[in-house]
Image (cartoon, helix red, strand yellow):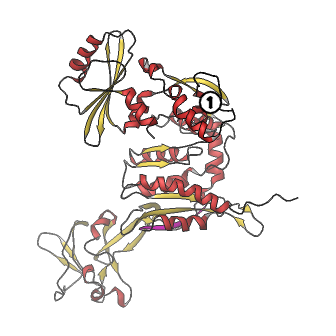
Amino acid sequence: MKEPKNTYKHSSWLSFIENRLSLAKNLLSEDGVLVVAIDENEQEKLGLLLESMFPDYEKTCVTVVHNPGGIQGQNFSYTHEYAYFVFPNNGQYIGKYERDDANKVPLRDWGGEESKREHSANCFYPIYVKNNKIIDFGDVCAEDFHPEDDNIKNEDGTITIYPIDDNGVERKWRHARQSVEEIRDELKCEEINDKKVIMRYKSRFRYKTVWLNKKYNSNVYGSKLLNNILGSKEFDFPKSIYNVYECLHATTQNDHKANIVDFFAGSGTTAHATLKLNEEDDGERKYILVEMGNYFDKVTKKRIQKLMYSKEWKDGKPQSQEGYSHIFRYQILEQYEDTLDNIEFEGEQMTLTSQLDDYLLNYMLDYETQKSLLDIEKFEDPFNYELKIREDKEQKRKKVNLIETFNYLIGLHIKQFDIYESQNRKYKVVTGKRENEEIIVIWRKVIDLNLEEDKRFIEEEIIANNDFDKIYINGDNYVTDSLLIEDQFDKLLFSN
């Protein structure tokens, strides 16, 4: 008997990806670009979805030949995947790429009737040259002005060059006056047949919509490269690093401090490509990766760590000690299962595996178990707060970073992190802004704390003469106008 088909598989996938794209849209800056890689299975549906979700954006689908050998289908051998580029209308958001073989062409248009002056008046202007170097560009010539020659020698030693052909016909430059200075570095003055001419050495080209280069081969520059870094095969179908690199180069070459978010991080190719691109153009791009797969520790994180030691690996062994200068931090978010594991019922012993209807279960979670989800008493020693966490299918107790968690909860944009010491304990202090508010957050161990001395130290040494709109402190304290961190935690975590 055949297994019934899921006739809703496309709609299920579209619902899944629509949810992610809605969040991604909120993260895009005004000039941000969204890049979505997809294979042939859902490419058409994705295109329609992007069109409906980004109506004011331009959408271009690039074909990337990532498997020249092909994946055998019933009728065709598939050699490519797709990358959708979604960017704002009416602007230039995609950069250009460098080609080794520079294309040498005259700046003067030499074609047929359409190359004549009258077809584009703003392309007829003088270019000033001295000692075979371009020194300036003149204004667009008046309609009734007609130069006597294409090369005019001036008394100051400069030569004025106009786009006039050998027959004296007034032509036009290929670039208008308002745009020619953008390509100034590509222009050279050369002498041909005793005449000074302007040539363009074009080495930067617009990206084409079909990428054919062998470097996009995911077998060689994806799987083989990753296996050499890790020492064994731990991940199926990683992308070629050059595929991702090219996407980043196309979209961030004019913003070396761009923030790059990849919410399907996989093997970490985006991090690798970002490091490579930053090194090549002295960029300061930052990446944020999101991954739910259980391979994170042994693939994604491990790859980045090993690249910091060496850029080149073979069979898991470094081929040099020259790695990427880099630091990264990773955070593990509490999962639904972790929350269940930390719930403790007061009174009669119960477990969430008990037969509870939805109403009773919600009641128990809201009222009977709240203390176990956020134990206020343990905030007395905030640097040793622990939760039960599942890791490698085992339950372990792990420290939780309450400082970082609180920063996220209140939406704090951090300016500075400081550590002070008093009463044989550390005071960890975060200062920052939230909207227009100046905020300071102070953490310390409260057990056996002299609160009078604590007040003096905080007000005189930490806060001093700074004018903060809000002062958050954990645990008991006598500090004037302070807010209790525990109250804010409780309010923000359980108010909904």
Vertical order, 14 against 157 (above or below): above
> Which amino acid is tagged 1?
Arg
Q: Residue at x 55, y 55 (%)?
A: 243
Residue carrying label 1: 390
Q: What is the residue that sits farthest to the right in this orientation?
A: 1
In this image, 337 relative to 54: left or right? right
Predominant secondary structure, magenta span: strand
Taking 140 as reference, is 232 left or right?
right
In the rendered view, would you say 259 is above or below 193? above
Q: Residues within 10 Å of mark 1 (few under 14, many from 20)?
A: some
Q: Residue at x 59, y 21 (%)?
A: 347
Residue lying farthest to the left in this orientation: 155
Magenta residue span? 56-65
Residue 279 among those drawn in magenta: no
Where residue 349 sits in the image (x, y, percent)? 64, 23
Front-most of 489 and 416? 489
Q: Is residue 466 left or right of residue 72?
A: left
Residue 103 vs 303, above or below: the answer is below
In the picture, measured across the screen, residue 42 lies left or right of residue 409, that is right
The magenta stretch spans residue 58: yes
